[in-house]
Image (spheres, rainbow, N blue to C red):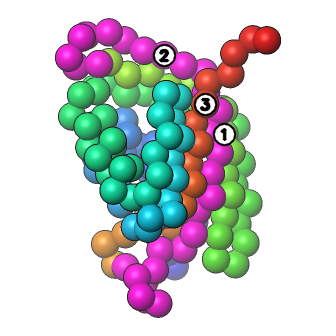
Amino acid sequence: MSPSAEAIVCDYYDALCNGDPLVPYFRDDASTVKFGISESLFGIDEIARALTEQTETTDEWTVSSRHLVVDKRDDFATMADDVTMAWTDTESGDRYRFDSRWSGTLVRAVVEGEADADAPAWQFTVLHVSAPCEL
């Protein structure tokens, strides 16, 4: 049995903390979207460039999930979470910390109708990370 969508989200958090490649967690498609605290990335090429740069220029990540909710349907799942995340910018040495909100949509990983053995069982088609502010 393949890992659940919830397990894949947790694996993504672990990969982020471990400095492992993050691109495999995203569907290889021009319609895949990732919104970060300070960025909007459209398409897997932009996402791959940004995630590669992020991995190369940050370190000491922590990701603390406070309320992960995953709703799995047949071939897609939605997720939402309250996450405290922190990292160090390796170029400046600055440490950043945010209480953030994550939401996203995952689909079963397929390539031309068949599961891709190298990809996680579920992949993000949309991932949105934001930091709330007081109004």
| Mark 1 to mark 2 CA distance (whole Å) | 16 Å
Q: Secondary structure at mark 2?
A: strand
| Mark 3 to mark 2 CA distance (whole Å) | 12 Å
Q: Is residue 29 magenta?
A: no
> Count the marks: how many?
3
The residue sitting at 26% across, 37% down in the picture is 53
Foreground tag (3 vs 1): 3
Which kind of residue does numbered mark 3 sit on? Ser
Task: List the residue tagged with mark 3.
Answer: 130
Residue 106 location (% of width, % of height): 58, 62
Residue 102 location (% of width, % of height): 62, 39
The residue sitting at 47% across, 74% down in the picture is 109
**Quarter that holds the C terminus:** top right
Callout 3 environment at 10 Å: few (<14), some (14 to 19), or many (20+)?
A: some
The answer to whether residue 74 is left or right of residue 34 is right
Which residues fall within the magenta stretch?
Answer: 89-116
- Could you tell which of marks 3 and 2 lies nearer the N-terminus? 2
Callout 1 environment at 10 Å: few (<14), some (14 to 19), or many (20+)?
A: some
Q: Secondary structure at mark 3?
A: strand
Task: List the residue tagged with mark 1.
Answer: 81
Label number found at residue 97: 2
* Tags 1 and 2 touching, CB below 8 Å: no
Q: Is residue 108 magenta?
A: yes
Is residue 54 depicted above or below 69 in this figure? above
Residue 75 location (% of width, % of height): 64, 77
The answer to whether residue 135 is left or right of residue 86 is right
